[in-house]
Image (tube, coloured by chain):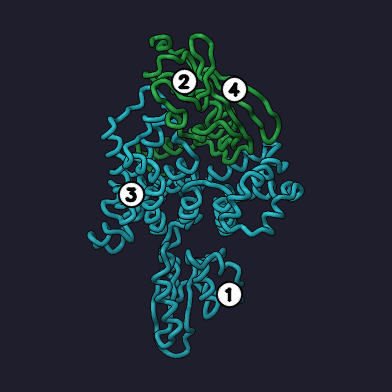
Amino acid sequence: MRTLQRWLDGTGDLRALVPLRIAAGPLVLLHLRPFLADAIDGRIYADTFWQPYASWYPELPRAGYVALLWVTAVAAVALSAGLFTRVVAIVTAAGVAYNLFLSQTHFHHNRAFLLIVLIGLAVLPVGRWGSVDAMLRRRAVPAPAPLWPLGLLRFEVAVAYWASGLSKLIDGDWWGGLVTRLRIEQYGDLAASRGVPDWMLEIAGNAGFHWWFAKVVVLTELAIGVGLFWRRTRLVSVWLAIGFHLAIEAFADVQVFSLAGLAALVIWVTPRSGDRILTVHTGNRSARRLAAAVRWLDWTGRFTVTTAGGTGRPAATLIDRPGADGTPVIRTGRDAVVMVLRRLPVTFWAAALVPIRTERRRPPSSTGEVRAAASVEGVGG
Amino acid sequence: MTPRRGGRWWARRVVVGLVVVAQFALVARAYWADHDVFGFQMFPESSRWQAEIVRVDAGGTRHDVRDPWPGGYRWGDLVTARGLGDPFSARHADTGLASTTAFLRASLDWVARNTPDDPETLYLEAVVTLWHNGRGPQTEVYRSVTRPEAGAG
């Protein structure tokens, strides 16, 4: 209950959503591509079979509809750049929504998922970091943002996984493996053309395999949809989600779902940024490289990177978030590096397999650094 | 001390509550509706379907829609969405049989209403063969609305 209240009334730092905002532009262009291609050829939805949801839904004249598609595409590009972010995010979401709800034939789950992400980006202040807007405003520390829209976005994104898993769990044909077996029979050629090796396709053709495989698929979807909500299971769920989306991309044509699903994983990053302090020794070349790499690859803003000189200092020191006892966790040397790699978007999936060997804790309130790390403790999850 | 519960405090809870309830309702609706909208039942079936579609004129003569059509219409030009453009050979029902057949029925009506240069066709009819997750076949017949233009030529 207390966690729910923190999400409803609390504020946080949404810098981690920047990669999603940047990805949104290309995703929208990919989504709009068939509509724009038709428009270039002089065709729109109304020239062939279409089916409105409701007779009262407003229809634009042909030129207006085509203009709306192009305005949405331009707005999506501006959204990626972070130019007039709030306005273009709303325009992008509204344009995609209008087109999606224009005809029932336009609806696909991947488009619904994309629209949910776009509405989230329109509601959340995602232009405060890594954007043209931020460069123009030159405001050093953006104000914290309300967290409840992020909480709703998390709920909506998780629904796509658990609702799908639940529907398969209670469907005997799915749970028993019949659906996956028939699907592999139908789409084996597509998978082969996308580089799935022959030995894998041979295994996938076995009926006994599918009895187990279907259960793995169903439980994976449920594990992702539920596990993402808890801190202890989140990393495993993100791992599962990456494998899940890559597998879907190989075996099915899901338009933008895989890319949108992967990009949307950043919403599960804890909405605090810069609260892990990495201090590298100025005299150590490798440590300086690590600092440079972190500055380039820390897309979700997890780290504050500082430098220090002097003798007797380790090459790298990481003051992590407080552990269960409230004391910031200190890691040095190799463990610090592994922990840093575990928190960078491009390396976490591999670094998660490398064990952390030791853990050292510093007594509380001994240094300014520890106080800084402790002071950013806020909404978790 | 309990913080004051102002309008924004309540508005947040109302918005969040409405979205959550609406989403649960859409998930539940997907279990019986033809079209699963925001219910996220992805890859629901591995079912297949195939249809023979004919135009029936006022005299009862049946014309395959693949044959020349008064007004120069072609089925594949009129209906392109949801895999309905080429229904003549067996194909996967991407969003399940209920959704596919609902779209097919709607497409028959749409074609009947949007082919004004055809003075001959009274209605369209589809004889549909369905294989639900490999079981079947099961045959169903769908008929479009009747066209008032029939016999006008």
Checking the image for residue A32, the label placed there is: none
Picture coordinates of residue A180 (x, y %)? 66, 44
Which quarter of the rendering shows the C terminus of chain B?
A: top left
Left or right of B105 in this view: A199: right
Using the image, name the chain to which the residue with label 1 belongs: A
Dot in front, 1 or 3: 3
Type of amino acid under label 2: Asp
Type of amino acid under label 3: Ala
Tint of chain A: cyan
Residue furthest front as drawn: B68
Q: Are marks 3 and 2 on the same chain?
A: no
Checking the image for residue A76, the label placed there is: 3
Q: Residue at x 56, y 68 (%)?
A: A350
Choose the circle earlier in sequence order: 2 or 4: 2
Q: Which residue is identified by label 2?
A: B109
Using the image, name the chain to which the residue with label 4 belongs: B
The reply to whether dot 3 and dot 4 touch (C-beta < 8 Å) is no
Q: CA distance from mark 1 to mark 3?
A: 45 Å
Type of amino acid under label 1: Glu
Q: Which residue is identified by label 4?
A: B127
- Disc 1 packing (10 Å; few <14; some 14–19; many ≥20): few
Q: Which residue is identified by label 1?
A: A359
Front residue of this view, candidates B131 and A245: B131
Q: CA distance from mark 2 to mark 4?
A: 15 Å
Q: Secondary structure at mark 3?
A: helix
Q: Is residue A203 above or below residue A104?
A: below
Q: Are marks 2 and 4 on the same chain?
A: yes
